[in-house]
Amino acid sequence: MCMKKQTALWTIFGISIAGMLFSGYLSASELLAKACPLGGCSSLLGIPTCVYGFVMYTAVLVIAILGLKGKK
């Protein structure tokens, strides 16, 4: 069974929105409140790892939007 391109892009779009909401919540809690809601949050190069997740999900969202707006 093969998924259509549009269906795949809409699925990726939805997953990236969910990922941005979750990692954004974690990032805001970590950066603004200086407290990790999950307990033991880790850092990489002095930046909380949830911030990297937010950036990656944002990049995936932009790529999905570009794919949806592109030629069909």
Image (cartoon, grey):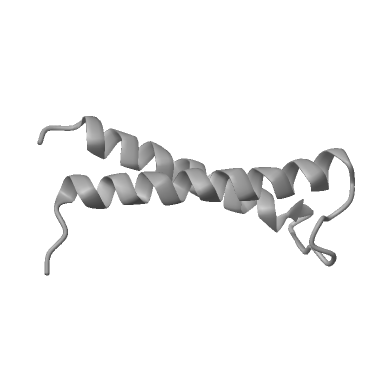
- Give whichever of 21, 30 is nearer the camera: 21
> Where on the picture, by quarter, is residue 42?
bottom right
The residue positioned 34% from the left and 41% from the top of the image is 63
User: Is residue 45 rendered to the left or right of residue 9?
Assistant: right
Quadrant, the N terminus: bottom left
The residue positioned 12% from the left and 32% from the top of the image is 71
The image position of residue 19, as x and y in percent, is 54, 50
Number of marks in the image?
A: 0
User: Is residue 12 rendered to the left or right of residue 16?
Assistant: left
Q: Residue furthest right?
A: 34
The image position of residue 2, as x and y in percent, is 12, 64
Q: Residue furthest top?
A: 69
- Give whichever of 7, 28 is nearer the camera: 7
The residue positioned 19% from the left and 44% from the top of the image is 6
The residue positioned 16% from the left and 59% from the top of the image is 3
User: Is residue 7 rendered to the left or right of residue 39?
Assistant: left
Q: From what the image shows, is residue 24 above or below residue 36?
A: above
The image position of residue 18, as x and y in percent, is 52, 48
> Where on the picture, by quarter, is residue 20?
top right
- Give whichever of 11, 40 is nearer the camera: 11
The image position of residue 15, as x and y in percent, is 44, 51
Quadrant, the C terminus: top left
